[in-house]
Amino acid sequence: MNKRIICTVTASILCLSSVSGCSGKMPELGGNDNGSDNDKSVYNMVYYGEIETLNYLTTDTEVDYALCANLVDCLVDYDQYGNITPGLAESWSANEDMSEWTFKIRKGVKWLDCDGNEVAELKADDWVAAAQYVNNYANEPGNQYIYNTGGVVHNAQNFYDYTEYMALSEGGKLKYGEDGEELVPVPAVREDEIGVTAPDDYTLVYTLDYPCPFFLSCLSYSAYMPVNRDFLEEAGDMFGRSKENILYNGAFRLTEYIPLEKRTLVKNEDYWDKDNVHIDVINAKYQKDMSETNAKTFLDGDVDQVFVSVDEMSEWLNDPETASQVHSMRPDISYSYFYGFNFTPEYDAKYEPDNWAKAVVNEDFRKSIMYSLNRRELTEVYEPYNPDILLEKTVTPMTFASVNGKDYTELEPFKNIMQNEQFDTALAQKYRDKAVKALKEKGVSFPIKVLVPYNPAVVNWDKECQLAEKQLEETLGTDYIDIIVERGPDTGFLSGVRRSGKYSFLLCNYGADFADPATYTEPFTAGNTYSFWDKSKDSEIKKLFSEYDELIRQAISTYNSAEKRYELFAEAEALLIDHAIICPCRVSNGDGYVADRLSQFDGEFAPYGLATSRYKFKTIHESSMSMEEFNAAYEKWENERLSHMS
């Protein structure tokens, strides 16, 4: 996930747990209106991570997204299977090459303040104002990158670059920037030259620099949310600093907010789609210690959602009363995990980076490692009761995309990959024996040191690395490789390890930014800080990278045939796997296990953007699912999703 999330394995942030008003004392509503308390469907949440800001236009944190997604709507919405549906835009159309997109804005939508008072009507200019704000360097936008994803909104980056230059040079007066380097003048670009325009109050046009068939899926981020221009200008630097300093047009209003204490969301009775909002009040209470919510508080009805760790699961499953209430989380296919080889190592001499660099370019050597990894066993470290629902043989997960009724992973280039086993010790040893002879001729010394760092802040990553070490050394022999599992920094792991190339073999992840296989190509294109294979001086690796790069170029330029486009992307991804540039593993298991009176299958779904953070469509159930009930519901949803995917 490009800039939006941490792009190596990150700890799951257990942000939320919930309480239903139907299962305990009706909570106080903080003096809000909307009728009798007893008539309300109330959902109490315990949360562990506080938001940084309500400025949805600039934030780049998941915790902020999760709240703001319920306060302000996007142009498009999603159904429970991931299909795009009308949101604040009633309809849309694109020109022939999909470089210009026109939206018809829903009439009659109101901007409200936190007390429910009408402030203004939603207009097309609200998206123009948002684009001008997000792409202005002075506003410190953390999510501006999304305007440069896919088709690239015309002049968005040019305006950002110009405002950055003007800010650093104090209006063009200074010759040198903060780092002492001479500033290069940037051509002037006006904010009204950004390719977001409003021909009238209910027509919005995005002009892109390149054709982009998946542009609609880029609109599911807060940077593309609207903002009322007059309110934004009046609020100034205070915009997003408090519940009073934003306006609302989403399913809920934030009526009470005391940082590190509580917040209350109340259903927006003026919401354009209020019939699909089934929860009236969401009370969220801040809790520092996660242990305060447990099996007893769940069974007593004090809480309606409890996250359960791997270590606690046996206790839950051994008690018949709790065993019927706990289950896995739905796999999060927006996060794909894979092991990557580093082709340009930059670590200390004691780990023999030059020796590794000579070994890693040998395909037989890489395949000996790839086929030694028992990825199901590695996945059991995080999901011992249901590992198979997480396993993937490709980087682009199953069910992420489809074309002509066929899942992307079923396309012809993946045929052998999907049919063959990726764990085969006999095959691993065969590749080892082939590699030894060739590597000795290249002057490689044995055993080959393999530096495998992990982030200690991520629960169980150390255990996975230790298990991988055991698998590799037992299969291949310690006279062949020496796996060195090393604790990395618990802060700054990305910059200190992966981005700086201080590893031999590393568990990485990447997340989708939009609904197209192109999103999963970014870690492997030139200039990205995964594997560094584009920087390798080896002729064979350079040849493979050139082939991959050309396939990606062809795929991206193919916008008028989804089938041909996807085939090209699949061919490129298959090249990565067939030549063991990477070793795909699994998708994320979300927050692990949970007892939950909200069903994950009721609400909106999309493997990117903000959809899954919304409480729209969700209802409070009387009890949680058991593991068996969850598995059946997940299988049913997965089958329905494939049949409903557009």
Image: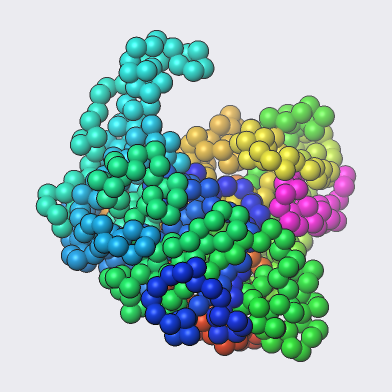
What residue appears at the point 26 percent right and 57 percent down from the top-left corner? 119
State the scheme by which the image is colored: rainbow
Residue 51 appears in view: yes
What residue appears at the point 20 percent right and 36 percent down from the top-left corner? 192
What residue appears at the point 81 percent right and 78 percent down from the top-left corner? 315
Residue 331, placed above or below residue 62: below
Q: Position of residue 621 (x, y in %)?
A: 54, 85
Residue 145 appears in view: no
Residue 478, placed above or below residue 597: above
Q: Position of residue 116 (x, y in %)?
A: 33, 65
Please state which of residues 617 and 388 is positioned toward the viewer in this rendering.
617
Q: Is residue 346 left or right of residue 57?
A: right
What residue appears at the point 56 percent right and 80 percent down from the top-left corner? 26
Per the rendered image, the range of residues in magenta is: 452-479
| Residue occupying the far right of the picture | 479
Q: Position of residue 643 (x, y in %)?
A: 40, 79
Please state which of residues 248 and 92 is positioned toward the viewer in this rendering.
248
Q: Position of residue 396 (x, y in %)?
A: 50, 59
Question: Where's the C terminus, which quadrant?
Answer: bottom left
Residue 259, placed above or below residue 617: above
Number of marks drawn = 0
